Amino acid sequence: MAERYEIRFSGAGGQGLITAGIILAEAASIVEGKSAVQSQSYGPEARGGASKSEVIISDGPIDYPKATIVDACLAMTQVACDKYANGIKPGGLLLLDEDFVPNVPEGDFKVVRVPIMRTAQEEIGRAIVANVVALGAMIALTGVVAKESGLKAVLSRVPEAFKDLNEKAYNLGFEKVKAAMA
């Protein structure tokens, strides 16, 4: 049976986490040639309501396109954490935005806390790239695709004028998680 890895990005609508999931799926499938599927769910509110994006990556065919036992979950808000940080497998990973998720749920998983939104706002100067910071962080945390593959997928999606900004965001997210895990 092929190895199946399930990742869930969750936060508020408008934070770009569905796009982050799509980019991760592209890094796995287009750049690395693995099987990948991405799905999304969000409330009736276009902005502000809880939303999630799930990515399943496998070396072989994917028989079911929804996450069932999550290997790694990102929660950018407390509401998203309360709603979507369930179903993480024993020994799994939970990445939290340390400024927006004060209450850590109980569970048999490793918790890593990183200032994702603050990094985007203060170190890059643009909150809009928080999803790319989060993507870099999740790739560093999981190792599900190579760092270079994730960056290649990010850069293939952004206009030329924003490539440097997004590369900086991606690398900062990656570095923040590596430092938090050290």
Image (spheres, grey):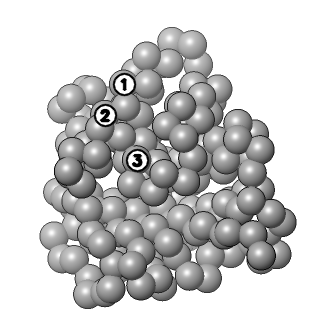
Few, some or many residues within 10 Å of mark 1 (<14, 14–19, 20+):
some
The local secondary structure at tag 2 comes to helix
The answer to whether marks 3 and 2 mark residues whose Cβ atoms lie closer than 8 Å is no
- Residue 123 image-quadrant placement: top left
The three-letter amino acid code for the residue at tag 1 is Lys
The residue that mark 2 highlights is 172
The three-letter amino acid code for the residue at tag 3 is Ala
Where does the image place residue 144, in percent across and percent down from the top left?
A: 55, 54
- The residue positioned 38% from the left and 69% from the top of the image is 93
Horizontal arrangement in the rendering, residue 7 relative to residue 79 (left or right): right
Few, some or many residues within 10 Å of mark 2 (<14, 14–19, 20+):
many
Report, in whole angstroms, how far the alpha carbon at label 3 lies from the one at label 2.
10 Å
The residue that mark 3 highlights is 140
Looking at marks 3 and 2 on the same chain, the residue that comes earlier in the sequence is marked by 3
Return the mark for residue 168: 1
The local secondary structure at tag 3 comes to helix
The three-letter amino acid code for the residue at tag 2 is Leu
